[in-house]
């Protein structure tokens, strides 16, 4: 029987354009529901694409603070989420539920 080698899926490998980033975050907001860790991890994926150091400079947060807040078990404050979203060149919009 042949061995199958699997690699961990990393969405950051597929996020190339601004549109990709926005669509990914929008999909994660819909899929993640009320799970703040899921949304924080999605923001972390985008942050890795954009560069943690650059994002830290733009938000005024430390790299370590960003890694902690946007990691798998992160629980950033709403203020931190807004800072990160704006620093990424994205915006948060609200609309009626579908």
Image (cartoon, rainbow, N blue to C red):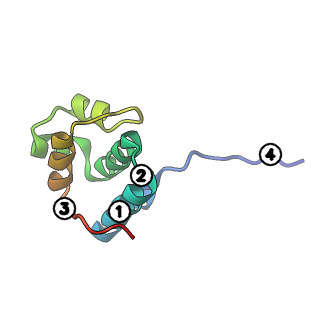
Residue 7 to residue 86: above or below: above
Residue 82 point in image, percent of width and height: 17, 49
- Determine whether the residue tagged by mark 1 lies in a helix, strand or loop: helix
User: In this figure, which residue is indicated by the disc labeled 2?
Assistant: 33
Label for residue 94? Answer: none
Would you name the residue on which mark 1 appears? 26
Residue nearest the viewer, comparing 87 with 93: 93
On the rendered structure, is 8 left or right of 75?
Answer: right
Q: Would you place residue 46 above or below residue 61 in this image?
A: below
* Residue at image point 34% right, 58% down: 25
**Which of the marked residues, 4 or 2, is nearer the chain's N terminus?**
4
Rendered location of residue 80, percent (x, y)? 18, 40
Whether 68 is drawn above or below 58: the answer is above
Tally of numbered discs: 4
Q: Secondary structure at mark 4?
A: loop
Q: Residues within 10 Å of mark 3 (few under 14, many from 20)?
A: few
Local crowd size for mark 2, using a 10 Å CA cut-off: few (<14), some (14–19), many (≥20): few
- Residue 37 placement, left or right of 93: right
Pointer 1 with pointer 4, Cβ within 8 A: no
Measured from the top left, where is residue 74 in percent x and y?
A: 34, 33
Instruction: Determine whether the residue tagged by mark 3 lies in a helix, strand or loop.
Output: loop
Which residue is under mark 3?
91
**Of 42 and 36, which appears nearest the observer?**
36
Cα distance, mark 3 to mark 2? 18 Å
Percent x, y of residue 46: 32, 52
Q: Residue at x 41, y 62 (%)?
A: 27
Q: Nearer the viewer, mark 1 or mark 4?
A: 1
């Amino acid at each position: 029987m042949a061995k199958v080698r699997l690699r961990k899926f990393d969405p950051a490998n597929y996020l190339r354009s601004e549109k990709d980033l926005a669509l990914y975050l929008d999909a994660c907001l819909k899929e993640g529901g009320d799970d703040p860790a899921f949304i924080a991890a999605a923001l972390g994926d985008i942050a890795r694409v954009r560069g943690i150091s650059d994002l830290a400079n733009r938000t005024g947060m430390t790299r370590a603070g960003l890694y902690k807040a946007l990691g798998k078990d992160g629980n950033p404050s709403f203020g931190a989420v807004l800072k990160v979203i704006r620093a990424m060149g994205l915006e948060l919009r609200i609309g009626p539920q579908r």
